[in-house]
């Protein structure tokens, strides 16, 4: 009797609090015979989902009837789709950006219109084309992968060949490889920004700023999120050969110091060991709370880990920087598990997040899943998680979704910082360099108990501040994510 | 007599050493796999294993004790941030030998003496260990090994077919529908620029097919007896070419065929295609003239009928085609002179029948 009482009170007093109490995963059945290496997802205005797949199919899924229909076929490795209206989709495939139109209204595309193909192809498999995304002014952006020296090039190329761009592990021997391209409303395709290696994620934040993810490898000590602006160079040198006015030299012959001074650094680095091996698409939570408490924040997919990434932006004196945190880490532990290979993301009209998975010859999975927020339905309220991390002149302020219990939040021992950086160099990846433990010298808690202010013993720009949080609590709620990595580019005065 | 002595000497040496030295090279394929997934050596082999990484990401190669692959992989994953510094190899008895982290395009080797048994080898990079592995059998009875297709120590090629309902009714087409001709594949085709469009047309004996080069806006070649095999192209990362099924009977050995006026530069711009009863009608623009091209099979026999529609032009319009043995070209207007078909002024539509 006593044992039963103890047990039941234990169950009542200390329920297990995990992210799966707030979100659930559902696997979307895909049609028999479909090899669901998902290259793109986009919702049509009428609520149907458009999805494109590695073998060239573009299919429409009606979430209400759960019926899939073929819309278009025969595309060359399509890796992005955006719905223009209920009868038109914009798809990027290896050779071009294509507008698919169902002009006779029979539900199947009959017109495959080349919107632009004004970039080169060497035939190397790594020359993927990603995107498209549209800004408020009607510009469309795509990003072009460099080629890999894991394989050669074809005898026949499309576009001009430049042997100076053929050097290095990832190379750009045909135009605009390693570039983000802008297609203006008048149809001109302009090279917009350079220095990318494998820019598989492209999207806008809530303010309409363009962001691109890039993948750890040569010249990328770790994977990154860049705030992309016209004319800037983001660090992978191969693409420089296509920069107007760039001298006729192999960019790899430039001193690293020179390249380093030319580049614009990332807004947020994703530490390879914990956050991302291969970041993918960027989407902004525009669900107005239907997807939980993270309205207007960026979510980013990841190929190798069964989690997504969430961005906590911070703007210091005009410099974009900020932190990343895992989202849905270990999610689905009492239900359907989240798979890896989350290549494409799209918010549905109902506020759930659809995930298109692929492996594409790398690590990953296949299929489509969705994550649905059930927090408000279950009456649990929002999970306890970090909402923002902002730099102060002496440390950081952390804001949480819930008021924190005072005792746990005020303990200095609950905040452990490491700081390190990743080397900018030609080699593949980088170890964490100059790893230091950074003592927290003071902690204060705001009156509403939601914001913690930390004072650190030292702050140095050009480093990542990796914070491991202790067991912070908010009543019955446990902290969902203990690891937060802040990329400190610029100090706050 | 001398021969017998030599054999006797060899036998003696082997008995004394009771150990063999073997060198094997293992490489990577482009799909997170070792190129060889089953190696067989004799018992008591001192094996030098050379690992050549041809992939575009780093890997290692770790040989474990029998039945220890998953445990080693689990411990490697648990290394977390410490992993890279120790090449993602956990320090544990189950690890018999390992390479360092092998960057793309580089080589490392290991030496291990294998007594008897099934010794897994695996890449312990985070995430790789569940699919990128193989087995080394040290045995004097290789005939008793299971067939490779039933070997539980080798990766299962169906490893990713995890959602059962997806694979109950595999279509021969490789799609969730049967392939219906005419059909279009944009893919990497042999003997063509990288922006290739393969088109399969209906007809007897597997139909007829052709490749249109979207980069150069022209027909490249045609074949009969089948369409394409995309197996290699679809597998992995997409480097390998789609294969032609059938026999090529026509190759256009010239360049872009159209001449509008007298301008030297005649660079066409591909504009896409429209499906008409599933037949693609290509559209491209050269020197201000929009050209539509729709290709159908000859009703009987081997050949193609190319139908062209042109927007008005004030300039002269010519179509170039080199004479080829075995190929008859018959335009519906005018005639070829020295490989040039000069269209009568005002021609807006014509066909070119190509037969073999």
Image (spheres, rainbow, N blue to C red):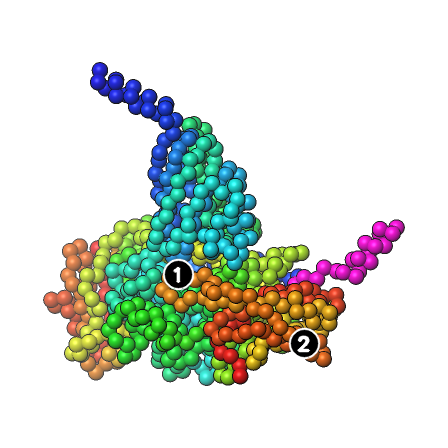
Tell me which segment is drawn in magenta.
A1-19
Secondary structure character of the magenta stretch overall: helix
Q: Residues within 10 Å of mark 2 (few under 14, many from 20)?
A: some
* SS label for mark 1: loop
Q: Chain of mark 2?
A: A
Q: Is residue B270 visible?
A: no
Which residue: 26% across, 58% down? Answer: B191
Q: Position of residue A420 (x, y in %)?
A: 49, 67
Task: State whether residue B192 is above or below residue A225.
Answer: above
Picture coordinates of residue B129, whole percent (x, y):
49, 49
Splitting the image into 4 quarters, where does residue A152 fall? bottom left
Crowdedness of circle 1 by 10 Å Cα count: few (<14), some, many (20+)? Answer: some
Q: Is residue A156 above or below residue A119?
A: above
Location of residue B179 with respect to A391 vertically, above or below? above
Residue A162 seen:
yes
Q: Quadrant of the C terminus of chain B?
A: bottom left
Residue at image location 38% in from the left, 41% down from the top: B49
Tag 1 subunit: A
Front residue of A393/A400: it is A393
**Is residue A382 covered in magenta?**
no
Q: Nearer the viewer, mark 1 or mark 2?
A: 2
- The location of residue B205, given as percent across then percent down, is 32, 49
Corner quadrant of residue A369 = bottom right
Badge count: 2
Badge 2 is on which residue? A444
**Which residue, given by chain and number where applicable, does mark 1 sit on?**
A428
Residue drawn at point x = 44 percent, y = 56 percent: A362
Nearer to us in this view, B99 or B250: B99
**What's the mark number on residue A419?**
none
Judged from this view, the residue extending furthest toward the top is B1
Dot 2 falls on a residue whose secondary structure is: strand
């Amino acid at each position: 009797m006593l044992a039963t009482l103890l047990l039941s009170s234990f169950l009542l007093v200390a329920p297990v609090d995990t992210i799966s109490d707030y979100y659930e995963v559902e696997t979307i059945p895909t049609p028999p015979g479909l090899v669901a290496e998902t290259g793109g997802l986009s919702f049509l205005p009428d609520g149907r989902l458009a999805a494109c797949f590695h073998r060239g199919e573009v299919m429409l899924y009606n979430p209400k009837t759960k019926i899939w229909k073929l819309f278009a076929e025969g595309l060359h490795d399509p890796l992005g789709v955006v719905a223009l209206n209920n009868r038109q989709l914009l798809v990027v495939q290896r050779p071009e950006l294509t507008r698919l139109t169902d002009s006779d209204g029979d539900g199947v595309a009959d017109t495959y219109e080349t919107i632009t193909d004004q970039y080169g192809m060497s035939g190397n498999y790594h020359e993927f084309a990603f995107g498209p995304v549209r800004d408020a002014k009607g510009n469309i952006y795509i990003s072009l992968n460099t080629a890999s020296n894991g394989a050669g090039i074809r005898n026949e190329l499309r576009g001009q060949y430049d042997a100076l761009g053929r050097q290095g592990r990832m190379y750009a021997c045909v135009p605009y490889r390693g570039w983000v391209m802008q297609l203006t409303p008048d149809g001109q395709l302009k090279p917009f920004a350079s220095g990318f290696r494998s820019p598989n994620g492209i999207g806008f934040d809530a303010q309409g700023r363009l962001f691109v993810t890039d993948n750890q490898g040569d010249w990328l000590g770790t994977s990154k999120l860049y705030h992309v602006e016209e004319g800037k160079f983001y660090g992978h040198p191969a693409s420089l050969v296509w920069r107007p006015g760039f001298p006729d030299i192999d960019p790899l012959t430039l001193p690293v110091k020179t390249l380093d001074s030319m580049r614009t650094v990332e807004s947020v680095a994703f530490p390879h060991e914990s956050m991302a091996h291969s970041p993918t698409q960027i989407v902004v939570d525009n669900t107005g709370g239907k997807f939980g408490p993270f309205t207007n924040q960026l979510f980013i997919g990841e190929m190798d880990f069964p989690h997504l990434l969430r961005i906590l932006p911070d703007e210091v004196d005009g410099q974009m920087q900020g932190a990343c945190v895992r989202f849905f880490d270990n999610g689905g532990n009492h239900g359907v598990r989240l798979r890896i290979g989350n290549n494409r993301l799209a918010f549905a009209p109902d506020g759930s997040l659809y995930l298109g998975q692929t492996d594409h010859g790398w690590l990953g999975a296949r299929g489509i899943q969705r994550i649905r927020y059930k927090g408000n339905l279950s009456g649990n309220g929002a999970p306890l998680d970090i909402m923002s991390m902002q730099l102060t002149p002496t440390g950081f302020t952390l804001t949480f979704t819930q008021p924190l219990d005072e005792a746990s939040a005020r303990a200095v021992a609950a905040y452990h910082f490491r700081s390190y950086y990743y080397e900018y160099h030609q080699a593949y990846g980088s170890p964490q360099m100059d790893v230091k433990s950074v003592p927290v010298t003071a902690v204060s808690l705001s009156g509403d108990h939601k914001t913690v202010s930390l004072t650190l013993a030292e702050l140095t720009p050009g480093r990542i501040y990796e914070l491991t949080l202790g067991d912070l609590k908010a009543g019955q709620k446990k902290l969902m994510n203990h690891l937060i990595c802040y990329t400190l580019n610029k100090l706050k005065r | 007599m001398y021969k017998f002595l030599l054999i006797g000497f060899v036998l003696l040496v082997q008995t004394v050493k009771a150990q063999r030295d073997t060198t094997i090279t293992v490489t990577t394929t482009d799909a997170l796999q070792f190129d060889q997934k089953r190696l067989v050596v004799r018992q008591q082999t001192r094996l030098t294993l050379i690992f050549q990484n041809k992939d575009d990401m780093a890997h290692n190669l770790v040989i474990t004790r029998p039945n220890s692959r998953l445990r080693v992989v689990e411990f490697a994953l648990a290394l977390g941030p410490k992993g890279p510094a120790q090449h993602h190899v956990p320090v544990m008895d189950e690890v018999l030998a390992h390479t360092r982290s092998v960057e793309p395009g580089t080589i490392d080797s290991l030496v291990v003496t294998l007594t008897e048994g099934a010794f897994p080898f695996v890449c312990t990079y985070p995430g790789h260990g569940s699919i990128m592995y193989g087995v080394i059998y040290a045995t004097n009875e290789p005939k008793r090994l299971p067939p490779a297709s039933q070997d539980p120590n080798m990766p299962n090629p169906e490893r990713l077919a995890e959602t059962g309902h997806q694979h109950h009714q595999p279509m021969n087409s490789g799609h969730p529908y049967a392939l219906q001709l005419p059909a279009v594949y944009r893919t990497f085709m042999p003997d063509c620029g990288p922006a290739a469009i393969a088109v399969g047309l209906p007809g007897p004996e597997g139909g007829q097919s052709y490749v249109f080069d979207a980069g150069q806006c022209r027909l490249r070649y045609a074949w009969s007896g089948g369409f394409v095999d995309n197996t290699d192209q679809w597998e992995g990362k997409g480097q390998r070419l789609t294969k032609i099924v059938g026999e090529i009977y026509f190759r256009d050995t010239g360049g872009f065929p159209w001449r509008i006026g007298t301008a030297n530069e005649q660079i066409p711009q591909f504009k896409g295609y429209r499906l008409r009863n599933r037949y693609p009608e290509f559209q491209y623009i050269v020197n201000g003239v929009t050209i539509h091209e729709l290709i159908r099979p000859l009703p009987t026999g081997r050949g193609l009928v190319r139908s062209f529609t042109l927007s008005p032009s004030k300039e002269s319009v010519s179509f170039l085609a080199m004479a080829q043995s075995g190929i008859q070209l018959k335009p519906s207007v005018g005639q070829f002179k020295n490989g040039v078909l000069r269209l009568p002024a005002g021609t807006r539509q014509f066909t070119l029948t190509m037969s073999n």
